[in-house]
Amino acid sequence: MCPKIMKYDSRPAAGHSLAISQRGAFTVLELLVTIAVISILVALVLPALGAARETTRRIQCTDHMREIGLAMQNHHAAKRTLPVGWTIEPSGSSAYGWAVPLLPYLEQSSLANRIDMSLPLDEARNDHARSTALTVMLCPSDITEPMFTLYRDGEHEDENETSRGLPLQQLSTAMTPALMTLPTVNYVGIFGTIESDDDIPAPVGDGAFIENRPVRFRDFARGTSNTIIVGERTMAQVPSTWIGISLAGEDAAARLVGSALQGINHPLADECDHSSRHPGGANFLWGDGHVSFVTENVDLQVYHRWAKLRDN
């Protein structure tokens, strides 16, 4: 007698098939919960990533200022002085900034050789240098344009008034021609505690970088480790440059040097004050070559004392 062959139906029961189908899809509630969890994770991770990036940029900024500090030390060792804040060229129409004599000590000898400080800054001989941005003079945290336009003192505001409301195609005829285009920087020499945005000749500053007069480390009455010589400033406050300026330019001296007046990142700061996009303060280079972060809540009297070569 042959054994009976049992037949099995491999198809799942109707209810079982329905259960599998239901488990394979998200419900609206599950989808909303997933989106909420992802949103929370993104909200937690993005600030951490932003903070990490800013930390990296701040370290790069510090490294740039240290390079400048080393160049200052080498310049002083070779010349027995720091560079002059700015040097007015023979024609009296323009001035060259303190960073120009530093170029050979910043591994920029070829660029230095293409600058003729006996000629006005806008001469063709200096065209290459006037269009050259120096990475070592820029803070990675700031939002900068590689170049900015220097206008004649008092005419930039008039241009804005004149061009207000005009169609775009008419703006060029309403605008007064610019004096020159210059490379942007974030690091400016310390003029002291006196405003440096006046016309040139400027008042005599009480800091390390002043007009047509070299300063030596022996002039630092409280020592080089207690005196700031270079500080940060954002482009939004006033665009600054390393090469030099036309003496007829708007806020001419403030394009090269800065002053310790209202404080760091102060909402009522003068154009020549110091600022940065680092949260809570700015980096400063000291006379002995070290760099430190100075917070916005620094005591104003202490801040002023740091910026001066000697107490009055």
Image (cartoon, rainbow, N blue to C red):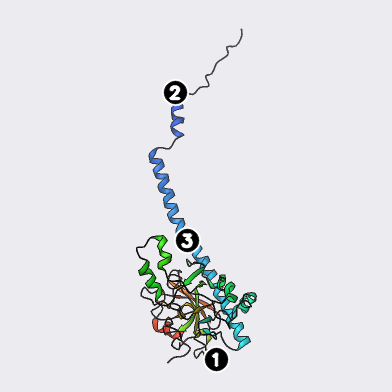
Which residue is at 42% across, 48% downward?
A: 37
Which residue is at 65% across, 75% downward?
A: 110
| Residue 266, horizontal then vertical, whole percent | 38, 74
Tell me the mark number nearer the camera, choosing from 2 and 1: 1
Looking at the image, tell me whether mark 2 or mark 3 is earlier in sequence order: 2
Residue at numbered disc 2: 14
Residue furthest to the top: 1
Looking at the image, tell me whether mark 2 or mark 1 is earlier in sequence order: 2
Mark 3 residue crowding within 10 angstroms, few (<14) / some (14–19) / many (20+): few
State the CA–CA distance, disc 2 to disc 3: 53 Å
Task: Check disc 1 and give the amino acid type.
Answer: Arg
The C terminus is located in which quarter? Answer: bottom left
Task: Check disc 3 and give the amino acid type.
Answer: Gly
| Residue 33, horizontal then vertical, whole percent | 40, 44
Q: Secondary structure at mark 1?
A: helix
State the CA–CA distance, disc 2 to disc 1: 96 Å
Tell me the mark number nearer the camera, choosing from 2 and 3: 3
Q: Secondary structure at mark 3?
A: helix
Between residue 22 and residue 73, name the one nearer to us.
73
| Residue 221, horizontal then vertical, whole percent | 50, 91
Q: Is residue 142 above or below residue 220?
A: above
Residue at numbered disc 1: 218
The N terminus is located in which quarter? Answer: top right
Residue at numbered disc 3: 50
